[in-house]
Amino acid sequence: MANESSDEKTSEIELLRSICEEAKKQKRITGSQIIRLHNTFGERFNKAWKAVLDGRVKRYRFKPSGRIVWIVVGKKRDYLVMPKVDFCSCD
C-alpha cells in the first residue's frame, strides 16, 4: 500500500512470519490462520492464496549453493519473491 506506515508493514511481516512458522511446524495451514491473513491483508491475501491454489507459485532450489528462489506466475509477467529479505519484484 502506498500510504502504509512503517509500523503497519512491520506488523504485517511479523504476523506473516508467525503464521508461516506455525504452519511449517503443523505441516498445514488452519482455517483460523487463513482468516487472520485475510483480515490483515485483504485482497492482497485473496490474490496470493488463489495463486497458491492455482499452482502459480514455483519454488526453485539451485545446486550446489542451495539458494532458493520463489517465482509467482502473474497474468502479465512473473514475479521474483525473496521472503528472507522481504522482497518482491511486484513492489
Image (cartoon, rainbow, N blue to C red):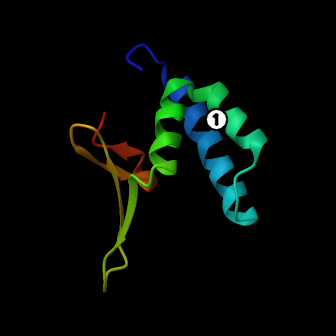
Which residue is nearer to you in this view: 47 or 87?
Answer: 47
Furthest residue in direction left, as rendered: 76
Identify residue type, mark 1: Leu
* Above/below status of 54 relative to 48: below
Q: Quadrant of the N terminus?
A: top left
Write the residue at 69% across / 57% down.
23
Write the residue at 49% across / 19% down.
5
Write the residue at 46% across / 18% down.
4
Furthest residue in direction top, as rendered: 3
- The secondary structure type at the circle numbered 1 is helix
Q: Quadrant of the C terminus?
A: top left
How far across and down, in percent of the image, does residue 78 sit?
25, 47
* Above/below status of 3 relative to 24: above
Which residue is nearer to you in this view: 45 or 6?
Answer: 45
Write the residue at 68% across / 39% down.
34
Is residue 9 rendered to the left or right of residue 89?
right
* Above/below status of 89 relative to 82: above
How far across and down, in percent of the image, does residue 52 sit?
49, 50
Is residue 38 rendered to the left or right of residue 44?
right
How far across and down, in percent of the image, does residue 38 sit?
63, 30
How many marks on residues?
1
* Above/below status of 15 relative to 62: above
Furthest residue in direction front, as rendered: 54
How dense is the environment of label 1, judged by Cα within 10 Å: few (below 14), some, or many (20 and up)?
some
Q: Name the residue under label 1.
A: 37
